[in-house]
Structure formats: C-alpha cells, structure tokens
Image: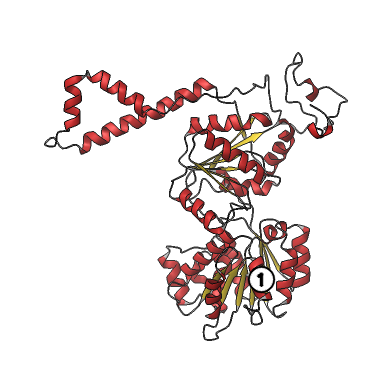
Amino acid sequence: MIILFKQFNLPKSIEDALIDLNFSSPTPVQALVIPEMMAGHDIIAQSQTGTGKTFAFSIPIITQINHQQAETQSLILCPTRELALQVFHEIKKLLKFYKEIRVAVIYGGESYTKQFQMLETKPHIIIATPGRIIDLLERKKVNLSSIRVLTLDEADEMLKMGFQEALETILKNMPSERQTVLFSATLPFSIKKIASKYQKDPKILKVKQDHLAVKAIEQFYFLVREFDKKKLLVRLLDQKNPDSVIVFANTKRDVDVIFNYLQENNFLVDALHGDLKQNQRQYVMNNFRKNNIKILVATDVAARGLDISDIKMIINYDLPHEDEVYIHRIGRTGRAGKTGLAYSFVSFKKISQLKRLENYLKEKINFLNIPMIEEVQQTKANFFQNHIINLINEHKNNVKPEAPNLLVDILLKQFEVKTIIDALLQYSAPKQRKYEYIEEIKNRIHIRTNNKNYNIFNDSKTTHNSRFHKPKMIELTINLGKKDGIN
C-alpha cells in the first residue's frame, strides 16, 4: 500500500517540489493512478474534482518526458480555458526544480501571436482545449506526431459540451502507439465508446466515492414554488450574510435572471457563463477570489476550473440533473478540514429527485422552513450591531490619547452624545429592505419512506393545490401563450 510519495521512486526534482509544497502522502486517486501510469498502462480513472487528480496524471507525465528532445511529447486536453489554466499552474509547481521542461497552455479567446510564440519554443507538454487544438492543426501550427501520452481531463464534460468530433480528429493526428489516459467524474456509454476505440486494455480505476467529504458540509433544503425562488434567495443571503457564496443554476438564462435580480437588490454579485470572453471571465473570477464580490452566480460548466479554497456557502437554485454533479457543487465548500453550508431550493416537481439524491448520498438532507421576514430583519440588525461593537473595540485599542480628534470635540460642544450616535448609526446602517411576499406551503411534510406514492401534504382538508394528492389524476402541461391568442 502506497502511503508516501517517496515509495514511487520519483525523480529528485519532483520529490523536492512535493516537499516544497509540504506534500508527503498521495491522495487515494494519486495512489491508484501514479504507479499504473508510470508502468505505461492506458487508464480510465473515475474521480471527482478536488481529489488531487491533476497531480495524479501530471507526475507520471513529467517522469516520461525527455527534455533533451525538442518536441511535444504529452498533450493534456481540458473542456474549459479555466481548467486548462489550473492544470498549467499545477504542473508549473511540480516543475519548480526541473526548469528544462517547457510547458504551454493553449485555449480560445487569447491572442494567436502569443500562443504561436509559445509553440515555436517546441514545448514538451501542451495543455489545451479541443477547439483551439483543432484550429492550430488546421493552421499547421502544432505537431502531434511525437505524442507519447495523451490525457483527457474531465472527459465526460468534453463530450457533454459537444467535443466528440474534435476529439476524434485530434486522436487521428497522433501516433497509435501512445499511452491514453481518461479522467472522468462519470462513466457514460460515450466514454466507454471512446475508450474501446482508442485505448488498449485500459486499467479502470475507480476512486471510492468519498461521501465522507460531504459529511463536513451541512446540507439543507427549502420547499419553495418556482416563482418564489428569487425572493427566498434574497432572504437567505440577508439572513446568513456569507463572505463568499456560489449560486448554481442549470441554465445560462437562469444565471442572467438571478444575477439581474440580485444586482437590483444591491448585492455584490457577478455572473459566470459561456458568453463571456476570456479576459472578462478572468476579471470576474479574480474579483471573487479577492472578495470584491461576495456572490457568484454560475452554471456548472462555467464554474469548471474555478479553484477557490475557502467558499463559505453553496446554493443550488435548482437541483442538478445528475447526483454526482451535486457532490461536485457542494464539494467546493467545507474544504481543508473546514465545515461548509449547502442549501437547495426544491420545487414540488423535484421532490422525487431529492429523495433519489438522498438515497445516493446515503444521508438525509435537512428540511428548513422559509425564513420569516421578522427573523431576517432581526438577524441583519444583529450583524450590524456586532459590526459596530467590533469597530468600537478596534478603535479603543488603537486610539492615541495625545492625538485628539478635532471633529469629535466640535460635535460634543454642539450636541448630546446620544444625538451624535443616533445620527451616525442612521447614516451608516444598511437600508431596510422591503422583502417580497412568499406564499407559505401549509402542512408540508417530506415523508421519507420507500413508498413511491408518498404525499407532501398531511391535511385532508387542504383544498389549495389539492391536485397534488387526489388519486387517479395526472398532470398535463400545455405550452400556450399570447402567440396562440391566449391572454
């Protein structure tokens, strides 16, 4: 059993880099993948982001590079620019004491001139997005004929994003005698199809799903109507006042709607979606890292490669379509031994999905009542009170008696102390927000049984929304509107 990096017999330069990073023991995925890759096997590794998978494939790649040969020997493909940059920076850490190896990162949205210059140095390792590699192949600016190791990072995401044809083209432009490594959070049929066509007897390595990582995260859900989600989001953000939060939505349209609504309500917020240019995306992410904005609204694909270690809270505005994506989302909080918070907004139609998710997690997600307006207002008042007390204590500890404040003296000569304090508090206090009404869902219970026909209402007298519990009924939705002559 591998418990220390030195058991891999790595080159001294890599060992020194790991020591410099204060890493002595491999993560489970690293312990599985590194020896198999170093032995030259093709690999399919099923592992989530945040498990150390970048080092798992980067360390064996570096050990196989012959720096004396000025040719590209390894290609790492990533679905997004952000992930490509993240992989690039991780590899550079490993190469701190091995300067002879050249690495280039290539992606769309950047200057061709700059990337052409990088390619002219004949980098030993290229990290790239599929679209840009195809572009460079067509321009005859990149040569893949000497590739020894091909790595597809987050291969399932690449296929979801429509890169299958691009991958096929790239694979045809490199030697058949090579090592091919696939990393994927899920193993759908499309991944298996690629593997059967382009890999030779691959080792399938599955990292045991780490539900223990989720244990450090407190998980809650609200039962809320779809049209009330925005209102609930405002209440929750005001009540919890997190330093950093990511709000996940399933579509770009929802991201835009949420972003605009929060901005109208004076929150420090920005959005991350596929329509942004690379410099805009970088600007948004840097602002979030520096805490210039506290709230980031994003889709799952847009948030790929967003590597921020101290996110306080995750909000699932919608439950994701896949259970594994839920773990990926909430796993962005509660890292490095810290606890995290995750809240999910669940509509009537998604209760069965919530039940399925709980079965997958093998644990209960706790139900919460929608916070009352009075509760939110009181919590906001407490936040402000504590802020003022902290400022007073800070000032008391730093003030110098020999340096009187002229303005204080002037004010005290004209007004009572209480009058001055009242005026200053009124000036600095956050404006009272007018919270929108959220329709209460009466007598709601979430019955956690194996009975598929469970009922979310516990009051036979309930008439409102009675369609949800009348027997022998089905719900039919017809999409008609103004264009069809219906007002």
Image quadrant containing the C terminus: top right
Rendering quarter of residue 260: top right
Say whether residue 355 is visible.
yes
Rendering quarter of residue 17: bottom left
Q: Residue at x 64, y 71 (%)?
A: 133
Choose between 477 and 351: the one closer to the eye: 477
Q: Which residue is mark 1?
A: 135
Label 1 environment density (alpha carbons within 10 Å; few <14, some 14–19, many ≥20): some
Image quadrant containing the N terminus: bottom right
Q: Residue at x 69, y 44 (%)?
A: 360
106 lies left or right of 98:
right
Number of numbered discs: 1
Regarding mark 1 in the picture, which secondary structure is present there? helix
Residue 222: x %, y % from top left: 62, 31
Say whether residue 211 is visible.
no
Query: Eyeballing the image, is 24 above or below 303?
Result: below
Choose between 112 and 148: the one closer to the eye: 112
The residue lying furthest to the right in this view is 472
Residue 477: x %, y % from top left: 82, 32
* Colouring of the image: secondary structure
Query: Eyeballing the image, is 56 above or below 375?
Result: below
The residue lying furthest to the left in this view is 402
Give amino acid for label 1: Asp
Query: Eyeballing the image, is 433 above or below 326?
Result: above
Residue 189: x %, y % from top left: 78, 59
Residue 186: x %, y % from top left: 70, 56
The residue lying furthest to the top in this view is 461
Rendering quarter of residue 112: bottom right
